Amino acid sequence: MTDVKRKKFTFPSAYTVILLVLLLVMILTYFMPAGKYASLQYNTDSNHFTITSPTGKTKSEPATQATLKKYNVNTSLAKFKDGSVYKPVAIPNTYQKLKKAKNGLFGAVTQFLNAPIQGLAETIDIITFVLILGGIVGVVNKTGAFAAGMASLSVRLKGKEAWLIVIVTSLISLGGTTFGLAEETIAFYPILVPIFMAAGYDAIVAIAAIYLGSSIGTMASTVNPFSVVIASNTAGISFADGMGMRIVMLVLGTAICIFYTIRYAEKVKKDPTKSLIYAQKAELEAHFLGDQDSNEVPKFDFRKKLMLLIFAAGFVVMVVGVKEWGWMFSEISMLFLGITFILAFVSGLSESDFVGDFVTGASDLLGVALVIALARGVTIIMEQAQISDTLLFWLSNGVSHMSGVLFSTVMFFVFILLGFFIPSSSGLAVLSMPIMAPLADVVGVNRDVIISAYNWGQGIMAFITPTGLVLASLAMVHVTFDKWLKFVMPLMITIGILAIVLLGISVYL
């Protein structure tokens, strides 16, 4: 009788995780009724408001404060005219249940298959950027510039490697809290992961420094126009209201993330077997550090320094462009395409070698591009089923009779749930604030408590939600979702408790 070896369970890839989420959301749409709030949007060309009913009928109204008052929208007219509120705003007390379209088996299969394709079309700007970035990284890797730069940096940081975590997490957190630095951080993985690994850490430390920095920064937004500013404007208050408590969350949250990451990083550095991804150590080192002899330090000559300087300058211009000039991914892709042409002349590679290395580098990130498209497909399914407004309607009714600390705590969890279904911070703000902000008046708390609950609830969900950026980030470094969950869950619980405590204090301020 022969022994039959049981196959060891392996966690599904990012693609399978998102497809499972897509399937679960589709099933959910059969049990939740469709519904929608009426919406109001400012038309800059005609200087009128367009009012769209739940059934899709539209009419035009004068762009005046009186019109806003008529529809119980407490936002200042000036905020519409200066572009601070640019998306359709939900009109309170207008929710209407809609007839759900009959969708048989064939229709469901068609919808399931079409969602990723439509997601690919709607995220083509982000995907273009990712592929161009991958091409550049392939070229820079081929020249040995990364390897030489890492060797030089490792010598300079000998004994002070933990400062990498402090600096990277702090700077990215600052970008997140001020202008919503999030999707753009995908650009940082190819250059920072090898540096962290050369310092003796594992790939999870690199993800933590970059992704946690972005997550805690956007969660504790202070002046981020895409979340706290648009949410405050839509709620009819100044974004400065509640600023003090949001700064406290930013400082404490960032400090906790840094401490947590350093504690894990130093444990791994002291004993690599403590790494959550120790089984992948050789594979990841071969991929990110190359297979050169560790005793042979690559020469960091002028050409290599110039290539890294040009590459790094691209990130500086990108950050300034996003923050100051309102760049989107089309402009960022143009920037890095321009850098590609410059590197073609600087690299010293032949035309055929350069093109070949660029294509190889781009193909390495094709998997990341597919993850982004699939994640967008989940959002498309929810939009088509029109269940987001229904969920908001149910939740707003559920909390309307609560008060004090209980109200703030439940609101935090309400926005955690809404954050999964509506991963767009600005989209959630304009949908939920006109409905949720008046509840603060009913229960006797300041409206800035609602803003903080929205900010922190949706923000903490971004640490793990498959419909957000996390799976694309993990795909960049070849780490599975279960390993990330094991690493981040204790931190999430700590940050969540901090958020609940600070919300409770806010109630009495």
Image (tube, rainbow, N blue to C red):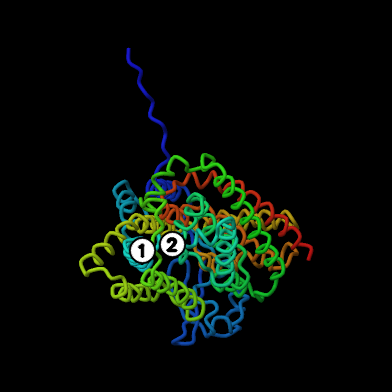
In the rendered image, the vertical position of residue 189 relative to residue 321, given as above or below: above
Q: Which secondary structure, mark 1?
A: helix
Residue at the extreme right:
508
Labelled disc at residue 4 = none
Which residue is identified by label 1? 137
Q: Measured from the top left, where is residue 330 in percent x and y?
A: 37, 74
Q: Nearer the viewer, residue 452 or 384?
A: 452
Quadrant occupied by the C terminus: bottom right
Q: Nearer the viewer, residue 386 or 79?
A: 79
Give the residue type that dot 2 points to. Ile
Q: How far is the residue under mark 1 from the one under mark 2? A: 8 Å
Examine the rendering and report whether any part of residue 99 can be seen: no
Residue drawn at point x = 31 percent, y = 58 percent: 117
Give the residue type that dot 1 points to. Val
Mark 1 Cα within 10 Å, few/some/many (few <14, many 20+)?
many
Which residue is identified by label 2? 191
Residue drawn at point x = 29 percent, y = 73 percent: 344
Left or right, 21 with respect to 175, comes to left
CB under 8 Å between discs 1 and 2: yes
Q: Which secondary structure, mark 2?
A: helix
